[in-house]
């Protein structure tokens, strides 16, 4: 007959120590990886890609119009940063770019007001402006995260 003291196994204290060590390691890995920052970096990468796509479409329009961006339906590009979207107070650029240069207007990945339904109902969450002296157009992402500035000027 076997005695209880000769049985092999782990004690409750040993199991708790191992669990505590695993919890400390998991916590250290989460702090090192910082998933919130990784997601913000991903959204910023998307914003940069969108801003570049919009600027390329504007440049293509300008190339077809002797170097001048032409958008008859929206008028001249505003001198101050203005949201690209339909409706009052926005610069309605979609009719000039969508179908010919873009399949749809890109929208900011985390802006709650940004959406694309059609050329007549959208808000990109991105802004556009034109320098009065150089005529350079700037497209920017005002809601960029991690204190980054995302803008392209041509």
Image (cartoon, rainbow, N blue to C red):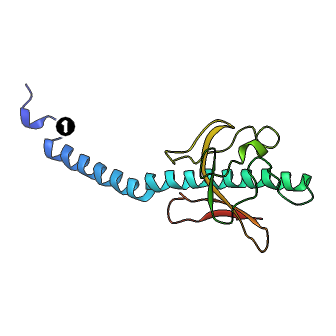
State the quadrant of the N terminus. top left
For mark 1, give the secondary structure: loop
Q: Is residue 55 left or right of residue 86?
A: right
- Residue depicted at x 14% and y 46%: 13
Res. 31 image quadrant: bottom left
| Above or below: residue 10 compared with residue 24 | above
Quadrant for residue 32, please give it: bottom left
Q: Is residue 97 left or right of residue 87?
A: right
Q: Residue furthest bottom?
A: 133
Q: Nearest the camera: 50 or 97?
A: 97
In this picture, is 48 found above or below 1?
Answer: below
- Which is nearer the eye, 99 or 132? 132
Residue under the image location 59 percent in, 53 percent down = 89
Q: Give percent across and percent down for residue 110.
A: 51, 47
The total number of labels drawn is 1
Relative horizontal placement of residue 18, taking residue 80 as reference (left or right): left
* Side (left or right) of 4 relative to 78: left
Q: Which residue is mark 1?
A: 9
Quadrant into which the C terminus falls = bottom right
Q: Nearer the viewer, residue 37 or 14?
A: 37
Residue found 56% across the figure and 44% down from its top: 114
At x 86%, y 60%, the residue is 68
Q: Position of residue 73 (x, y in %)?
A: 76, 46
> Given the current orientation, which residue lies at the most extreme top position?
1
Given residues 153 and 130, the one toward you in this image is 130
Mark 1, Cα crowd under 10 Å, few <14 / some 14-19 / many 20+, is: few
């Amino acid at each position: 007959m076997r005695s209880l003291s000769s049985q092999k196994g782990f004690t409750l204290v040993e199991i708790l120590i191992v669990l505590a060590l695993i919890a400390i390691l998991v916590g250290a890995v989460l702090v090192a990886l910082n998933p919130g920052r990784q997601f913000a970096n991903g959204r910023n990468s998307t914003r940069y890609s969108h801003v570049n796509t919009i600027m390329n479409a504007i440049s293509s329009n300008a190339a077809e119009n002797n170097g001048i961006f032409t958008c008859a339906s929206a008028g001249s590009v505003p001198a101050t940063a203005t949201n690209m979207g339909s409706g009052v107070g926005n610069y309605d650029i979609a009719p000039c770019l969508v179908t010919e240069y873009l399949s749809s207007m890109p929208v900011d990945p985390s802006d709650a007001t940004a959406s694309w339904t059609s050329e007549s109902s959208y808000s990109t969450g991105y802004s556009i402006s034109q320098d009065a002296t150089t005529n350079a157009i700037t497209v920017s992402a005002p809601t960029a995260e991690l204190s980054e500035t995302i803008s392209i000027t041509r």
